[in-house]
Amino acid sequence: MRHAPQPRSRLSGLARLAAPLLLATVCAGPVLAGDTLLAIESADGTVTELDRDTLEAMTSRDFSTETQWTWEEKKFSGPVLREVLASAGLEHGVVALVADDGYETKIDLDADAEYLTDDYPIIATRIDDAPFEVTESGPLWVMFPYDSHPELNVEKVYSMSIWQLKRIVESAE
């Protein structure tokens, strides 16, 4: 018995691979007012949910910097990571920063203290004074002022610059 030939796709191999990601991104839609942008989970299971208004009501910092991901100087603004963590009662220990796509990096709030100041990193809620969406690496991006602090241009800090930040989880260790 012969099988009918399968129709050929008009999409190239790369486009076929990217199509599901593009569809998921388009279907995700814009972040709406009141939507949780960031969930912070403490080791005891308590979850603090933060929306855009809550994040933007915190003390904001801004700086302009070029990054290896933007290739041109951009202005980033948002609350300082330490303040956001403190709002959920997290000031010591290890936390995992988790992106929308599953990327995860760990930060030891004590051992990595040299990179965690009262001025940076920030959780950027705006780039060039405008909110940004998942398709633009948002709506949250942990960012450092690379241009004004050359000592931050190290792999450890690059790994902390997580875009599409969705959750922060305190380690039970």
Image: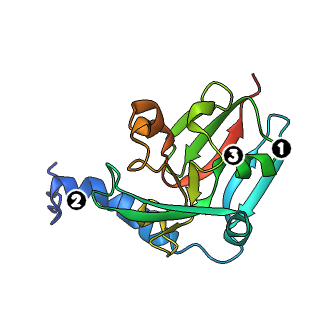
Closer to the observer: label 1 or label 3? 3
Secondary structure under the numbered disc 3 in the rendered image: helix
| Mark 3 neighbour density, 10 Å: few (under 14) some (14–19) many (20 or more) | many
Secondary structure under the numbered disc 1 in the rendered image: loop
User: Which residue is at 31% across, 48% downward?
Assistant: 68
User: Which residue is at 48% across, 60% downward?
Assistant: 63
Pointer 1 or 2: first along the chain = 2
Residue that lies at the very extreme toward the front in this rendered image: 148
**Label 3 sits on what residue type?**
Arg
Please give the count of numbered marks on the rendered protein: 3
Q: Position of residue 36 (x, y in %)?
A: 69, 64
Residue of label 3: 82
Residue of label 2: 15
Quarter occupied by residue 97: top right
Q: Is residue 14 visible?
A: yes
User: Which residue is at 18% across, 63% downward?
Assistant: 11
Residue of label 1: 89
